[in-house]
Amino acid sequence: MFGLLHAFPKDIGWIEVICGSMFSGKTEELIRRVKRALYGKQKVQVFKPRIDTRYDESAVVSHSRAALTSTPIERAEELFHHLAPDTQVVGIDEVQFFGPDIVPVVEALAQRGMRVVCAGLDQDYQGRPFEPMPQLMAVAEYVTKELAICVVCGNPANRSQRISAKGERVLVGASDAYEARCRKCHVPEPVDATPPETLPLFEK
């Protein structure tokens, strides 16, 4: 498990990224790491995007209903307004919702000496890299790729299959809107004429 196989840096901050598809246990792993820090009597703060209200308005909640108190924020820079001066560990769930602005925020926290644990989707429902996850993974000290189970064939799954009728890239949902699929069983939607860079950057 993480923390047993890795030696933490000393006297500096660092970044941990937990990535994967829907239903791969990203939030569950974030909660586990944060709770271990709390058991170690460290000062912890957890943040999540305000748009994610699937299970709770404010708490971070996994699909298995494990929960953790958090602060919902709209934009990445709002995190600094809520940050306590004695915080040692910062957790950020659904980090892809904050777009590229979250990258300098996370780096600034690590530069201040904090441990920053981020969890988010590394691919959108089309199987494309989901910014800002590639950038966060590049600057992180530790990256963990979680895999789900393909609902079609049972193989390890790293993609999120959109099963709802809505076609926009951003769609907050759970089992009502997505399934975990492997590379073979994932079926991307037909690509329209809109360039990817003009589409919204966030998806659940």
Image (spheres, rainbow, N blue to C red):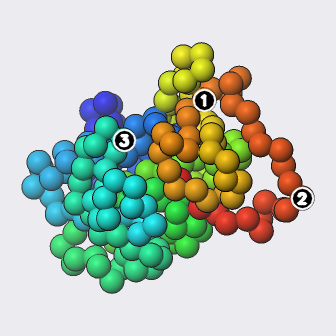
Disc 2 versus disc 3: distance between alpha carbons?
34 Å
* Residue 134 position within the rendered picture, expressed as x and y whole percent measured from the top left: 61, 52
**Amino acid type assigned to the residue bearing label 1 in the image:** Arg
| Disc 3, SS | loop
Give me the C-alpha separation between circle 3 and circle 1.
17 Å
Q: What is the spatial separation of the Cα atoms under label 2 and label 1, in whole angstroms?
A: 25 Å
The N terminus lies in quadrant: top left
Q: Nearer the viewer, residue 59 or 164?
A: 164
Amino acid on which disc 3 is placed: His
Whether residue 158 is visible here, answered yes or no, is no
**Residue 48 image point, x, y percent:** 38, 63
Vertical position of residue 41 compared to residue 6: above or below: below
| Spot occupied by residue 21 in the image (x, y as percentages of width and height) | 54, 39
Amino acid type at circle 2 is Ala
Q: Residue at x 57, y 67 (%)?
A: 99
**Which is nearer the N-term, disc 2 or disc 1?**
1
Dot 1: within a 10 Å radius of its alpha carbon, few (fewer than 14), some, or many (20 or more) residues? many
Determine the secondary structure under disc 2.
Answer: loop
Q: Earlier in the sequence, mark 2 or mark 3?
A: 3
Q: Nearer the viewer, residue 164 or 73?
A: 164
Extreme residue in the right direction = 193
Q: Nearer the viewer, residue 84 or 173?
A: 173
Left or right position of 57 against 132: left
Q: Which residue is mark 3?
A: 63
Label 2 Cα neighbours within 10 Å, binned few <14 / some 14-19 / many ≥20? few
Q: Which mark is residue 193?
A: 2
In the rendered image of this protein, does residue 191 appear above or below residue 47?
A: above
- Relative to 61, does residue 198 appear above or below in the rendering? below
The residue where tag 1 is placed is: 181
Earlier-in-chain disc, 3 versus 1 = 3
Which of these two is toward me, 166 or 145? Answer: 166
Residue at (29%, 65%) from the top-left corner? 58
